[in-house]
């Protein structure tokens, strides 16, 4: 493992390294932080001023926060050619979390976008000093003890060595970025506090500071621990859902035989600790099971004061350290450092433009990986501000995945206590957070719960995963955290079978539902511009369509119902509530005649899946529901039981026959009860999202957020038939799609059916598994499920042919059809049949017309 | 209270005590056999005395049993410790607790079989306030049992204004249902003697009729007078009932058991910021006061009535002719026999010899065959030697007064009151009163730190496993090792002692810990001052 240090300026000689490192993590009590900045190198920099420079009255961008994140954003914006950038820091540069963090840049991160950011950060930091390659290799245990003299290997099975991991001094990186940014013309003002951000008509207009106002077009909130409060302080409240937790690490005095600075950083996930060399001794911290949240009530301190050490709290980590490195017992303690870190509700950072306010960007909530992510995240955010979107899919980090509903202090406090330990937990498939639950529920929640529903949560909404039949042993069912066949396998199998043979009810109320209406045809015009598919359909028709960006990538994937001539009902995935809203708002003309309303809360959605759904509904409405009378993808307002005005839609999001009922919430319980009692003779039962997921994946339905993202076009996933190429309407992304159609797609969404995979004994696929074609890596999976019909595992994923000359090669049918595909599950490769279309023959028993092919789906996971 | 047991647990070297069974058969079925352990300097005690041992009592329990004891698992230990625990939380109204009492935790651990300690807790419904009490029986549990059922009714009656008493009497007269007087907070194991309820009620009614006669409209006794009157009246009723006897032979036998056994009582009455403690005997009430630095100090609200209390010795000597000065308190015991200097029951120390003989002769046959009933204490010249009159302390609660510990001597002889208050205080505040560790400029190795932390953690986890402060205190009282830390091995040994040996190592322990509501207490105080 290479240990690199970053030099901020030439004035700094390598001989000063140990001293700077000591500044990185440790202040002798009583020493003022001021000390480090009064060093000569600091004076030499452009940042330092003896008297405060007056603030400019206007700027293009104001960045709040002079930590490593803020300076990285400033640096990257400047590199992209932005001018008039002002960076404001309430205290001193790098005086917050940056001052204290442990300085480890690890490139092993759970999701690919995070790896990309960490990789980039790493090379960025090294770029300031030297270049090294990133190599990953499995190491045998004897090598581990060679690499690190102190590691106790007796209870280890293996270890992973990441030579690309680096150790740097955060204040130095901070300073280096600041210096470099200043060199590019960024104005940095310390001791300047942002009071609030001024807005007009949904645009940032100025920033009010304690030293006067600065007019600006863009504002970037990089305020770290204080980002939440700063967001709340603006006129239109900006929700930045993060919460601080105390974080402890130990500094030891040098060992009798000083530990070399090049010793690898050791992360012991089971012991929940990390250890790096520090001045001949060690620096070791961890992510405990019982974090201590702080600043819940908000605290407007300038810099993080020296926080109290809590040895009792650190005890488990100390024990883990001594277990891993028993020789450290004799090592003397230097200090226990308390360094608060901020965490978000889902362990991912918050990045991007806020939904309500144009020009208000956020980059915060780094979940203790600020140093690792700052470089990459700063770059992506700068790109976002420059080009309207980063060069990679950052949806998992997009602040718009959250809304105001995640902004409660109590919710955040409880959730971060669960999130922080997860950093070093084994990530099991189908993880559900336990805290902050039951926030949004359907009116049927209690009914379903008493019938054995087990719940998962999406965007605060409780959704049933499956229903435990009465009499089943609950204890064993709670142990469904496994990489192998889960214990709910047969339960979901029974639900799927019922969907196929009789009828099931799934409560799908969590979906995002908008109503777009206008007095004239403005609504149609807007949707024709935003949607790839043709919305000019007769009233009552349902259209599955993507909303694409300029690049032709999916910003949203939705079903639009033309309820009236100038009124549309838009159904989007649950977690699109904020993103889709802001996408629509962003492109809506300022026209009082055009009205968009979020009606998600007004309707309870019941999905009746199965061949007998039409019998149940027919009996409840005295209307024939056969395909002859109620064609597919059609919507009618009708009565169900006593309740009138139920929107009945002939689609199920699974490709199975059936209906979605959109029920005004006050009728929900009545309709549900009626459906269940009439359905009894047709064998009706409740089903959950796991059954739905199995059904949609075996039908090759892609899901936005999992399979589809802003970098995936309809052509890449075989949805050309949902693009209105045959019209002249210039919808968003049309040009890119036409171009791509001409060039051919370089990646293609395919379906892989695993062969020779023993469902009982083999590890199950999840997502993110590598796909090999003829032994060569050609892509990764994006989702997978067990198909009870095929009795096999089905993986969905993207593959692309190897590029020969550097330019991407187009996917040909041969590439898909003539190749030996394999899916790698935890090192074991399983042969798979690649398909571009679902196995129609296998579903032949179900009478389906081609136009019935319904390829939309919103169901998560 | 133990008649022959040690008053103080001393850290004396372990001695080998011959186990002497004093009584071949017990006087009363419910009375356990007290092992009396002669000490080396009184070899005469090899002749066991019929009832009241003349032997100098052991002044210390055995440290820790070295006999072959079972090893209990932590869950077994917990189930023993928690068997009698009880918690009461004062209900909140509108999200607020307006009472000065937040609630109480109580528990008891038997050493005698059956246990001779009793406890009671009740809320007065006709007047304000809450009553809590611990009762330590000796020579059987009958007297303590009677106190636990009856004493609070006597107190509640004494506190009632004239009008309420009249209403009550009118209701009884007219055969109307009575409005409830006390709301009991009882553990399922706390029982009432069903057969005696009618007799108890009649005695109580006579008492309130007298109270009506003695008071005039608009009058009621203050808490101090009420407690004093109730204590004295109940003791005299116990005595009277035994003299009168009952047609029902079971009841007749029962009232004699009550009167011939004895019990101490330590009772607290809490009404708003006014705390009254009435104490008879060697139970003790200690207030936990939180100092400004967060630490806890003990403020004792009662005086022990035993030989360690010079005032009590002087009082008793003063009440009898100078000729008895040497005999009235011998070997730190009343007449060389009884450890508490005040108690309910114990008519052997109260009645004249003639009365005792008369009552016993007319008593049920069960008594006749028993040699011990005819035993009269030595030097018994000027009875009564014993009184149930309580000493009453009033304390006005302050915000820093966090809790009150009522305990029988079984607790106080194992733990110093300061230690008791510290343990409870730390438990209740959840903060272990320990300095947050700082390394400072010291040379501490990681290994040393780990050891230190592990020890602190063990101590903290102990508090965590108890949901009841009284249980936590008992855990310390029984399980503390030489270093003042609870030690599972010690606990396991102490709790697995065979019934007949347990009493050698510890006494019955009964504890009630009442937590005050600092908000209300402080508020009322401010209101009172303004």
Image: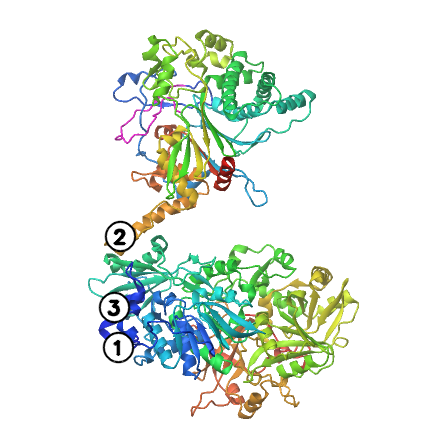
Q: Is residue A616 above or below residue A297?
A: below
Which residue is the site of mark 1?
A: A11
Closer to the camera: disc 3 or disc 1? 1
Q: Report x, y in % for residue A225.
A: 43, 64
Helix, strand or loop under label 3? helix
Q: Which residues are magenta?
A: B1-24
Q: Which mark is residue A241?
A: none
Residue drawn at (58%, 65%) of the image: A492
Any magenta on residue A137? Answer: no
Helix, strand or loop: magenta stretch: loop
- The chain to which mark 3 is attached is A
- Display colour scheme: rainbow
Which residue is the site of mark 2?
A: B448
Q: Is residue A483 above or below residue B377?
A: below
> In the rendered image, which quarter is residue B418 located in?
top left
Query: Cα distance, mark 2 to mark 1?
Result: 42 Å
Q: Which mark is residue A19?
A: 3
Asked whether, in this view, residue A294 is left or right of residue A510, the answer is: left
Residues tagged by mark 3 and mark 1 found on one chain of the structure:
yes
């Amino acid at each position: 493992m290479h240990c690199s240090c970053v030099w901020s300026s030439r004035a700094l000689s390598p001989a000063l390294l140990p001293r700077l490192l000591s500044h990185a993590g440790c202040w002798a009590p009583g020493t003022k932080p001021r000390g480090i900045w009064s060093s000569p190198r600091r004076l030499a920099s452009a940042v330092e001023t003896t008297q405060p420079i007056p603030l400019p009255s206007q700027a293009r961008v104001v960045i709040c926060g002079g930590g490593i994140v803020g300076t990285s954003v400033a640096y990257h914006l400047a590199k992209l050619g932005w001018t008039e950038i002002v960076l404001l820091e309430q205290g001193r540069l790098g005086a917050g979390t940056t001052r204290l963090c442990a300085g480890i840049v690890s490139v092993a991160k759970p999701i690919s976008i995070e790896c990309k950011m960490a990789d980039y950060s790493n090379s960025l930091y090294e770029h300031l000093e030297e270049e090294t390659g990133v190599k990953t290799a499995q190491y045998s245990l004897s090598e581990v003890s060679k690499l690190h003299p102190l590691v106790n290997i007796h209870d280890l099975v293996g270890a992973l060595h990441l030579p690309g991991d680096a150790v740097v001094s955060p204040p130095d990186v901070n300073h280096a970025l600041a210096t470099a940014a200043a060199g590019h013309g960024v104005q940095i003002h310390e001791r300047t506090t942002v009071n609030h951000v001024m807005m007009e008509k949904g645009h940032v207009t100025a920033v009010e500071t304690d030293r006067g106002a600065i007019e600006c077009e863009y504002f970037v909130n990089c305020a770290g621990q204080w980002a939440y409060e700063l967001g709340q302080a603006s006129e239109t409240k900006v929700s930045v859902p993060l919460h601080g937790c105390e974080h402890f690490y130990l500094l030891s005095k040098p060992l009798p035989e000083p530990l070399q600075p090049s010793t690898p950083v050791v992360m012991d996930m089971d012991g929940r600790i990390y250890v790096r060399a520090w001045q001949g001794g060690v620096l070791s911290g961890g992510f405990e099971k019982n974090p201590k949240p702080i600043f819940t009530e908000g605290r407007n301190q300038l810099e993080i004061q020296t926080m109290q050490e809590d040895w009792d709290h650190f005890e488990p980590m100390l024990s883990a350290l001594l277990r891993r490195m028993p020789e450290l017992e004799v090592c003397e303690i230097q200090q226990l450092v308390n360094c608060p870190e901020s965490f978000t509700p889902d362990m991912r950072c918050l990045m991007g433009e806020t939904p309500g306010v144009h020009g208000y960007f956020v980059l915060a909530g780094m979940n203790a990986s600020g140093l690792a992510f700052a470089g990459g995240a700063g770059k992506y955010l700068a790109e976002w501000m420059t080009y309207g979107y980063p060069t990679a899919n950052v949806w998992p980090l997009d602040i718009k995945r959250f809304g105001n509903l995640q902004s409660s202090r109590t919710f955040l406090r409880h959730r971060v206590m669960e999130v922080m330990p997860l950093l070093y937990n084994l990530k099991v498939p189908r993880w559900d957070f336990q805290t902050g639950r039951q926030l949004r529920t359907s009116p049927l929640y209690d009914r379903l719960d008493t019938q054995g529903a087990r719940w998962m949560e999406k965007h605060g909404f409780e959704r049933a995963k499956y229903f435990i039949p009465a009499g089943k042993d609950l204890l064993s069912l709670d142990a469904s955290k496994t990489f192998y066949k889960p214990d709910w396998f047969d339960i979901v199998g029974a639900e799927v079978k019922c969907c196929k043979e009789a009828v099931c009810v799934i409560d799908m109320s969590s979906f995002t539902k908008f109503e777009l209406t206008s007095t004239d045809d403005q609504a149609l015009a807007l949707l024709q511009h935003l949607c790839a598919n043709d919305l000019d359909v007769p009233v009552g028709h349902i259209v599955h369509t993507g909303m694409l960006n300029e690049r032709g990538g999916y910003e949203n994937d939705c079903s639009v119902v033309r309820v009236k001539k100038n009124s549309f009902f838009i159904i989007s995935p649950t977690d699109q509530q904020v993103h889709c809203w802001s996408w629509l708002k962003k492109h809506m003309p300022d026209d009082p005649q055009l009205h968009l309303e979020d009606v998600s809360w007004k309707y309870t959605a019941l999905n009746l899946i199965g061949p007998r759904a039409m019998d149940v509904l027919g009996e409840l409405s005295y209307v024939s529901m056969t395909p002859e009378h109620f064609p597919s993808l059609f919507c009618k307002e009708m009565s169900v039981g006593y309740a009138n005005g139920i929107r009945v839609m002939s689609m199920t999001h699974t490709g199975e026959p059936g209906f979605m009922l959109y029920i005004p919430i006050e009728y929900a319980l009545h309709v549900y009860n009626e459906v269940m009692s009439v359905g009894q003779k047709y064998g009706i039962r409740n089903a959950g999202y796991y059954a739905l997921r199995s059904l949609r994946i075996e039908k090759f339905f892609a899901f936005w957020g999992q399979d589809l993202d802003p970098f995936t076009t309809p052509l890449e996933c075989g949805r050309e038939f949902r693009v209105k190429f045959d019209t002249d309407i210039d919808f968003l992304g049309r040009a890119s799609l036409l171009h791509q159609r001409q060039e051919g797609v370089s990646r293609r969404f395919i379906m892989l059916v695993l062969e020779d995979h023993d469902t009982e004994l083999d590890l199950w696929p999840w997502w993110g598994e590598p796909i090999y074609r003829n032994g060569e890596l050609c892509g990764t999976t994006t989702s997978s499920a067990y198909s009870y019909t095929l009795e096999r595992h089905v993986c969905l994923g993207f593959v692309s042919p190897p590029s020969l000359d550097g330019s991407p090669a187009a996917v040909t049918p041969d590439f898909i059809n003539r190749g030996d595909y394999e899916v790698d599950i935890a090192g074991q490769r399983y042969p798979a049949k690649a398909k571009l279309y679902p196995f129609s023959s296998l579903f032949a028993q179900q009478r389906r017309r081609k136009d019935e092919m319904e390829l939309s789906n919103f169901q998560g996971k | 209270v133990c008649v022959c047991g040690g008053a103080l647990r001393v850290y004396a070297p372990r001695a080998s005590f011959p186990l002497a069974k004093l009584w071949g058969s017990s006087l009363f079925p419910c009375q356990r056999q007290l092992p009396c352990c002669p000490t080396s300097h009184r070899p005469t005690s090899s002749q066991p005395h019929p009832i009241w041992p003349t032997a100098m009592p052991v002044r210390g329990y055995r440290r820790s049993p070295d006999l072959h004891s079972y090893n209990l698992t932590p869950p077994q230990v917990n189930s023993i410790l928690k068997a009698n625990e009880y918690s009461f939380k004062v209900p909140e109204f509108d999200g607020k607790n307006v009472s000065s009492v937040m609630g109480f935790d109580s528990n008891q651990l038997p050493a005698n079989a059956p246990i001779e300690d009793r406890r009671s807790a009740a809320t007065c419904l006709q007047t304000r306030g809450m009553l809590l009490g611990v009762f330590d029986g000796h020579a059987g549990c009958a007297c303590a049992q009677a106190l636990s059922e009856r004493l609070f009714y006597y107190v509640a009656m004494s506190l009632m204004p004239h009008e309420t008493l009249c209403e009550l009497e009118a209701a009884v007269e007219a055969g109307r249902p009575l409005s409830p007087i006390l709301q009991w907070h009882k553990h399922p194991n706390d029982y009432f003697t069903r057969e005696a309820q009618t007799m108890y009620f009649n005695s109580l009614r006579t008492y309130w009729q007298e109270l009506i006669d003695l008071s005039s409209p608009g009058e009621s006794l203050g808490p101090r007078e009420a407690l004093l009157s109730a204590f004295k009246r109940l003791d005299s009723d116990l005595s009277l009932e035994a003299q009168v006897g009952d047609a029902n032979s079971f009841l007749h036998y029962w009232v004699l058991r009550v009167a011939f056994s004895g019990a101490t009582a330590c009772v607290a009455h809490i009404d708003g910021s006014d705390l009254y403690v009435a104490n008879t005997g060697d139970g003790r009430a200690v207030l936990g006061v939180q100092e400004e630095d967060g630490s806890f100090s003990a403020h004792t609200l009662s005086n022990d009535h035993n030989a360690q209390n010079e005032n009590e010795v002087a009082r008793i000597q003063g009440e009898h002719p100078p000729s008895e000065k040497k005999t009235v308190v011998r070997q730190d015991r009343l007449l060389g026999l009884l450890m508490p200097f005040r108690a309910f029951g114990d008519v052997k120390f109260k009645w004249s010899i003639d009365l005792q003989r008369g009552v016993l002769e007319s008593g049920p046959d069960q008594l006749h065959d028993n040699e011990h009933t005819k035993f009269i204490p030595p030097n018994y010249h000027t009875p009564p030697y014993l009184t149930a009159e309580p000493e009453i302390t009033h304390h006005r609660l302050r915000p820093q007064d966090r809790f009150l510990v009522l305990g029988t001597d079984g607790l106080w002889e194992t733990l110093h009151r300061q230690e008791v208050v510290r343990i409870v205080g730390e438990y209740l505040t959840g903060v272990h009163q320990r300095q947050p560790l700082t390394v400072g400029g010291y040379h501490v190795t990681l290994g040393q730190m780990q050891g230190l932390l592990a020890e602190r953690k063990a101590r903290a986890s102990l508090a965590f496993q108890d949901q009841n402060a009284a249980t936590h205190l008992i855990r310390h009282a029984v399980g503390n090792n030489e270093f003042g830390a609870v030690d599972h091995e010690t606990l396991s040994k102490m709790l697995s002692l065979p019934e007949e040996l347990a009493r050698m190592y510890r006494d019955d322990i009964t504890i009630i810990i009442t937590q005050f509501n600092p908000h209300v207490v402080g508020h009322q105080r401010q209101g009172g001052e303004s």
